[in-house]
Image: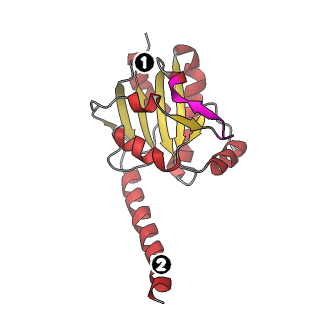
Amino acid sequence: MLNKLTSPFSAIILFILIAVSTNHLMSKKTVAQPVSSASATELFDMTLPDENGVPQALSQWRGKIIVLNFWATWCPPCREEMPELSALNTEYQDKNVIVIGIALDEIALIKTFAEENTISYPLLAAEDSGSSLAFKMGNDKSALPYTVIIKPDGSIANTYFGRISKALLEETLVKLIP
């Protein structure tokens, strides 16, 4: 009997805590974070399914400038920044730059999202492993969205907590493009 009462109550409390912490993190201005010694080595060793379930080796983008965006379909700031990320991907695709979206979601949710929205860059499903990867790449706040700019050599140029803008990303990109 107690389990039946505490389970819904626990779920409500957990939801409130997540909502409050997400709101707190998202209410702060997006700021570039200090670059750690982390690299994209583990990223390039991964294969993740795209929205159609087709496995994509992330090593196919090795040697490019990567704007890696961790997001989720249920995250409003994530969804809000996607048109700018899409525009950035289109504008810079001939300059060795690619935006990659890694969703902490199931493939079916990503597929539905992709069918309802025009996105010019690859969307990959990482589900639970995405949080671990984001943490290893500097997301010690477990925040979404979280964006990492990776240099062609695999080192991290910059990281951003919260909603990102095209203009802010371009501040870093212009320094990396020959």
Figure disc tally:
2
**What residue is shown at x 36% (from left), y 45% (from top)?**
29
Residue of label 2? 7
Query: Looking at the picture, how far across and down is residue 82, in whole percent?
Result: 57, 39
For the magenta stretch, what is the residue range?
Answer: 51-59
Callout 2: SS: helix
Callout 1: SS: loop
Query: Looking at the picture, how far across and down is residue 105, in whole percent?
Result: 56, 50
Q: Residue furthest top?
A: 178
Judge from the rendering whether residue 78 lies leftward or rightward of residue 52; answer left or right: left
**What residue is shown at x 60% (from left), y 31% (from top)?**
121
**What residue is shown at x 53% (from left), y 14% (from top)?**
95
Mark drawn on residue 152: 1
Whether residue 56 appears in magenta in the rendering, the answer is yes
Specify the quadrant of the image occupied by residue 172.
Answer: top left
Whether residue 118 appears in magenta in the rendering, the answer is no
Q: How is colour applied across the structure in the image?
A: secondary structure
- Amino acid of disc 2: Ser
Q: Residue furthest bottom?
A: 1
